[in-house]
Image: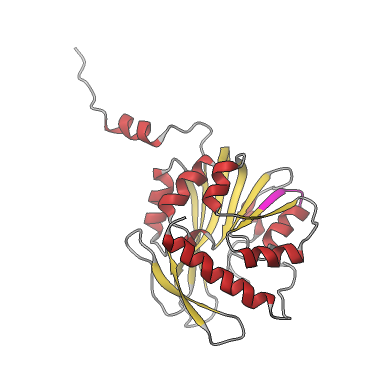
Amino acid sequence: MPDIEKHIAEIWSLYGRHQLGRTFDLPELDDWTWDIPQVGPGIDVLGEVAGLRVLDLGAGVGRHAARLAALGADVTAVDASPTQYQRALARYPDTPGLRLVCADAVDHLREAAPYDLVYSVSGIPFLDPHRLLPALAAGLTPGGRLVFSALHTNSHGDGPSDSVTARPEILRLPGTDTEHRMPMWVLEPRLWEGLLVDHGLVVESVTTIDSPQAGQPLSYRLYAARRPESMLDPSRRCARITAPVEAGP
């Protein structure tokens, strides 16, 4: 894991440790949202999940994963933070259809059998897409889907970056004024789409999710992509595209 991602994981571990020390905990998930409550698509965007092998990437306390397990999916919930994993394990110690894993997402994808569906509620932007997306593309079954939300514009009105680089965003510990500067890949949609296509995925949709509050610029994008039934190795695909066309006799 690169140093920048180790730093991100350390901050999430501080967050999880803080939450473990609080008496308050989030209620069970009634309404599925992609990080802005009461707006945007819900769980229906995932389609029928019963019987599917599903990966929740950056699962946190595991509420979304538990919801899909209750619907009949075989769900693996992965988080790199030991304290976030602790929170999930304390909350869902023995939930049928739910497996909790503390691991780097890329390492897990490389070792696990392919998944029919990988989703992430705003977890993907905390990982370097150049490291994550090759493992994600290879970690999907042919025809498998990837669905994830990503920050587009923060609450201060700072829009997405025009290059594939991380920038600092603020993570505040709940119930305190303590803030941490957290590196995050906040990218323009064309960059996310280009990265997905470059790694052999077909982009199905990009959905805008804006804050419903007047004057609040906070905005996310929800990306849905699919691995084709047959996918060429990226180097072979590029070679085929750039090969010169020979003239006929």
Question: Where is 150 relative to 195, above or below?
Answer: below
- Front-most of 76 and 198? 76
Question: Where is 242 relative to 157, above or below?
Answer: above
Please indicate whether residue 53 sits to the left or right of residue 233 in the image.
Answer: right
The residue sitting at 46% across, 44% down in the picture is 134
Identify the colour scheme used: secondary structure
- Front-most of 24 and 225? 24
For residue 73: magenta?
Answer: yes
For residue 72: magenta?
Answer: yes
Question: Where is 147 relative to 231, above or below?
Answer: below
- Front-most of 173 and 226? 173
The residue sitting at 40% across, 51% down in the picture is 130
Please indicate whether residue 190 sits to the left or right of residue 244 in the image.
Answer: right
Q: How many marks?
A: 0
- Front-most of 215 and 4? 4
Residue 81 x %, y %: 59, 63
Q: Which residues are magenta?
A: 71-76
The residue sitting at 59% across, 49% down in the picture is 118
The residue sitting at 73% across, 81% down in the picture is 23
Q: Quadrant of residue 58?
A: bottom right
Residue 159 x %, y %: 38, 71
Residue 48 x %, y %: 69, 47
Q: Quadrant of residue 197?
A: top left
Please indicate whether residue 189 sits to the left or right of residue 212 in the image.
Answer: left
Name, please, the residue furthest toward the top: 249
Residue 107 x %, y %: 54, 48
- The quarter of the rendered structure image containing the C terminus is top left
